[in-house]
Amino acid sequence: MFRNSYDNDSITYSPTGRLFQVEYALEAIKQGSASVGLVSKTHAVVVALKRSAEELGSYQKKIIRIDDHLGIALAGLAPDARVLSNFMRQQAMSSRMIYNRPIPISRVVSAIGDKAQRNTQTYGRRPYGVGLLVAGFDETGPHLFEFQPSGTVLEYFGAAIGARSQSARTYLERNFDQFPEASLEDLVLHGLRALRDTLAQDKELLAQNTSIGIVGLDTKFTLYDNDDVRGWLEKLGNVGSTRGRRPPEEREPEATEDAPVTDAPPPEETDTVEPIETDA
Amino acid sequence: MDHMPENWGRPRSEIYGVYNSAIHNAGPATHTQQPSITGTSVIALKYNKGVMLAADNLASYGSLARFTDQERLIKVGKETVVGISGDVSDMQYIELLLERLIIEDNYEQDGHNLRAPHIYEYLSRVMYNRRSKVDPLWNAILVAGKKDDGSPFLAYVDLLGVTYTSPSIATGFGAYLAVPLLRKIASDDGDEKNITEEQARAAIDECMKVLFYRDARSLDKYSVATVTTDGEVTIEQNVRCKDMSWRFAEHIHGYGTQKM
């Protein structure tokens, strides 16, 4: 309605004090498939649901290793995540080269936060269209940070971003008091359960579409994909979505029917009009 | 045959102007200096509870003992001491760099702070990069503190970008006179476990006395810094060499055969 006249560029406020371009960037994140992160006293874990555009295509990489002690999970515009992850790697390398120390997690996320904020205050530039969950381990222990296009960076015990992430967040909120003392195995299983709750109806967690990243005191950041996640999925047991089978009051609103512009190219146009599911 | 390279392949001077001989006489751009005001040795050794350093308070202008109140041991951050010998203006520049480094490091207040190994790596990069531009900071630096595992840390970096670490190190004349004395108690890694603070201090005082005897650009007034593995830094100033024997000088006149 009225909001359209104040959303032409990133540097214009609306009369109610909002920056619409930044809010639209947050919408781009919601189009991407889910990523979940959680932290215990000893480890930080990220798990992500990979999406593929078509049956014969590869699955979009969702977790990126930045350094031995640090990695990210993304949701949203994957190319923007690539640019930010390259920048983070430069920062991490620089810290090791100049100071001979692994970069503190809070410092690297401040650096990308400042970088993102610049794009919300410069004419002609657009905000980054990706949200990141930054999982790392430094001198002050394991950390999980959520990065948003606005430049906001907050630390969390557990977080989820992307499509249907509210279901994951609900699981995390119900169980987070078990996280600090959890073993690594239990922590990963909690993450997978939260991720499972973001699945669309009749979908399941498979070796091809599930990605796990783990970092801890004596554990360098390790990425598990494809065959390496089978073990975890077996431990999980039930890998199928519970959507559509839950009592009505617990069901969250269905994803929008807009074509995704994010980590998968939009599905092809078809002659018949049918709802376009974002998790095809 | 024309033997002048300036003329080879040249068009005629009447049309294009006379050859600019600055081109022929030019060499590479060079910035290597000579140091002007200098500090002499810095000496240090590890002991069972940390590291001890000493450096005298003299800033020499060649053979003139120009300033006798120059402090050359710097506390950096909470738990690190840096001792600098060589050119004093470059030392002051390094002090400035370190001050700025610590200020920036403290912006975040996030529980992460630069410690000795980090400051050492930073200084090594600065020194090596300056040498690679052939514009060195004319200094030799000792960095002392503690490592991430809590054990004492002591390392050296100089104007050439040379780096090394050892339980006992000294710069300048100290490398020749003090290191053999320090190595009597601290020569191999691990020796520091058996050295008490008193023994370390005795060794330091002895070395500073020997340096005053033999280093012609030294002073008998010096500072002693102690960095413990508990993270305490103390710098004792205005320490003087004690119990020196100058009796041999009583009967010396001049420099060689002079009798009066």
Image: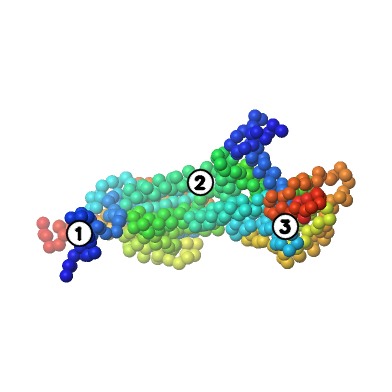
- Are labels 1 and 3 assigned to the same chain? no
Q: Is residue B200 visible?
A: no
Provide the residue designation for mark 1: B12
Disc 1 and disc 3: Cα gap in Å?
Answer: 72 Å
What chain does badge 1 belong to? Answer: B
Secondary-structure class at tag 2: helix
Q: Is residue B130 visible?
A: yes
The residue under label 1 is which amino acid type? Answer: Arg
Disc 3 and disc 2: Cα gap in Å?
Answer: 45 Å
Secondary-structure class at tag 1: loop
Q: Quadrant of residue A253?
A: top right
The residue lying at 40 percent from left, 57 percent from top is B129
The reply to whether callout 2 and callout 1 are in contact (CB within 8 Å) is no
Label annotation for residue A53: 3
Provide the residue designation for mark 2: B105
The residue under label 2 is which amino acid type? Answer: Asp
